[in-house]
Image (tube, rainbow, N blue to C red):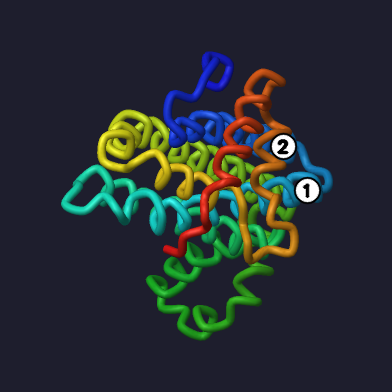
């Protein structure tokens, strides 16, 4: 954890700080999702969730390109990339679920209702989801459906956070040591720069500034010192 880090022996050790920042963000998102189960506006949750997924997708893509790709003939690196793909899939699926709004739970329940209708040979209703939706609302009540949606949302957020934590643990246990052993310091500095600075963004510092905000002052100083080091390294493409 970040509070246990007093120095960065290798540039890639900044990953511990980044993981701590991700953990703080994802725990905050999960808390907002838990609070949303009681109803109310999900605006703050949605804003935090979208930012979390945006950070996760950039982080995973950049790691695959600049950190694990150079580790050839390396099973832990390939497993890390597979975990990134799973994180991305779950994150984007959650976005699609959120985009349905509070009707998402209704949509999930409709599929079950349609199957039951088909089994009962009610073919004319099976192809008319709007009628099934109205039937479902009348059957169990709209409030119960919306409450179910919020519960499912919380459960999905919690599952994504657990997947994220597990990935970070695996990465710290198996991948970072290989980077230290196989990748020279200057190349590590280049990797770290790509992870923290997005040259293609309107605000290239959107990652590093966020990480700094999540850290305690001592770790923030470590990050600033590392930035001064990688800023002197020529930018390399992937």
Q: Would residue 15 appear left or right of 102 to someone viewing this image? A: left
Q: Could you tell me residue 193's position as x and y percent?
A: 54, 48
Residue 42: mark: 1
SS class of the residue under badge 2?
A: helix
Pointer 2 or 1: first along the chain: 2
> Which quadrant of the figure has residue 70?
bottom left
Q: Crowding near pointer 1: few (<14 within 10 Å), some, many (20+)? A: some
Residue at numbered disc 2: 32
Residue at point 51%, 33% (across, down):
14
Q: Is residue 204 above or below residue 11?
A: below
Q: Would residue 154 appear left or right of 160 to someone viewing this image? A: right
Q: Could you tell me residue 166's position as x and y percent?
A: 40, 34
Residue at point 46%, 83% (across, down):
123
Q: Are marks 2 and 1 in contact (CB under 8 Å)?
A: yes
Q: CA distance from mark 2 to mark 1?
A: 8 Å
Q: Could you tell me residue 181's position as x and y percent?
A: 26, 34
SS class of the residue under badge 1?
A: loop
Q: Is residue 224 above or below residue 2?
A: below
Residue at point 48%, 40% (across, down):
159
Residue 154: mark: none
Q: Would residue 109 appear left or right of 238 to someone viewing this image? A: right
């Amino acid at each position: 954890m970040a509070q246990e880090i007093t120095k960065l022996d290798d540039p890639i050790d900044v990953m511990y700080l980044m993981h701590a920042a991700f953990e703080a963000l994802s725990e905050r998102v999960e808390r907002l999702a838990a609070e949303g189960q009681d109803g109310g506006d999900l605006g703050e949750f949605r804003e935090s969730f979208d930012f979390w997924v945006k950070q996760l997708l950039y982080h995973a893509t950049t790691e695959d390109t600049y950190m694990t790709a150079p580790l050839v003939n390396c099973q832990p690196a390939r497993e890390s990339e597979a975990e990134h793909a799973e994180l991305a899939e779950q994150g984007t699926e959650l976005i699609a679920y959120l985009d349905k709004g509070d009707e998402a739970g209704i949509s999930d329940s409709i599929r079950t209702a349609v199957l039951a209708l088909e089994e009962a040979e009610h073919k004319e209703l099976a192809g008319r989801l709007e009628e099934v939706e109205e039937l479902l609302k009348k059957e169990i009540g709209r409030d119960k459906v919306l409450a179910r949606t919020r519960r499912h949302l919380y459960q999905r957020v919690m599952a994504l956070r657990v997947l994220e934590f597990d990935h970070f643990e695996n990465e710290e246990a198996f991948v970072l040591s290989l980077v230290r052993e196989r990748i020279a310091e200057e190349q590590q500095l280049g990797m770290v720069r790509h992870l923290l600075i997005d040259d293609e963004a309107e605000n290239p510092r959107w990652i590093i500034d966020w990480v700094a905000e999540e850290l305690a002052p001592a770790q923030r100083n470590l990050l600033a010192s590392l930035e001064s080091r990688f800023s002197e390294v020529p930018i390399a493409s992937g």
